Image (cartoon, helix red, strand yellow):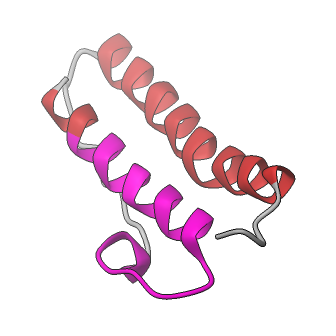
Amino acid sequence: MIEISADDWDKTFAINMRGVFLCYREAAKIMIEQGKGGKIIGACSTAGYSSHTMAAYYIASKWGVRGLTQATALD
């Protein structure tokens, strides 16, 4: 954890969290406009289900993707 730079943290979350958020948001807009409903299927690596050493920032981002996916499903 102490070796993770803030820049690495930010880059990882920009890709893994922001990227997924933007995709989900745009897909939802299209489905609403079409008026037919639909499903957004999200996937993350196994890091979203477990933890291991030397990758706290990556694992945190993948757990975040899981949470975002579950919350989006409820919305």
Q: Residue at x 78, y 72 (%)?
A: 3
The image quarter containing residue 49 is bottom left
Q: Residue furthest front?
A: 2
Q: Residue at x 55, y 46 (%)?
A: 17
Q: Residue at x 32, y 55 (%)?
A: 66
Residue 67 spot, x, y in % from top left: 30, 47
Vertical relation: 32 (above or below) 49: above
Vertical relation: 6 (above or below) 75: below
Q: Is residue 72 left or right of residue 30?
A: left
Q: Residue at x 21, y 44 (%)?
A: 70
Q: Is residue 25 left or right of residue 50?
A: right
The image quarter containing residue 55 is bottom right
Quadrant placement of the C terminus: top left
- Give the extent of the magenta segment: 46-70
Vertical relation: 64 (above or below) 59: above
The number of callouts visible is: 0
Magenta stretch mostly in which secondary structure? helix
Q: Is residue 69 left or right of residue 36?
A: right
Q: Residue furthest bottom?
A: 53
Q: Is residue 22 magenta?
A: no
Residue 74 spot, x, y in % from top left: 14, 30
Front residue of this view, candidates 67 and 4: 4
Q: Is residue 60 left or right of residue 67?
A: right
Front residue of this view, candidates 1 and 55: 1
Q: Is residue 56 magenta?
A: yes
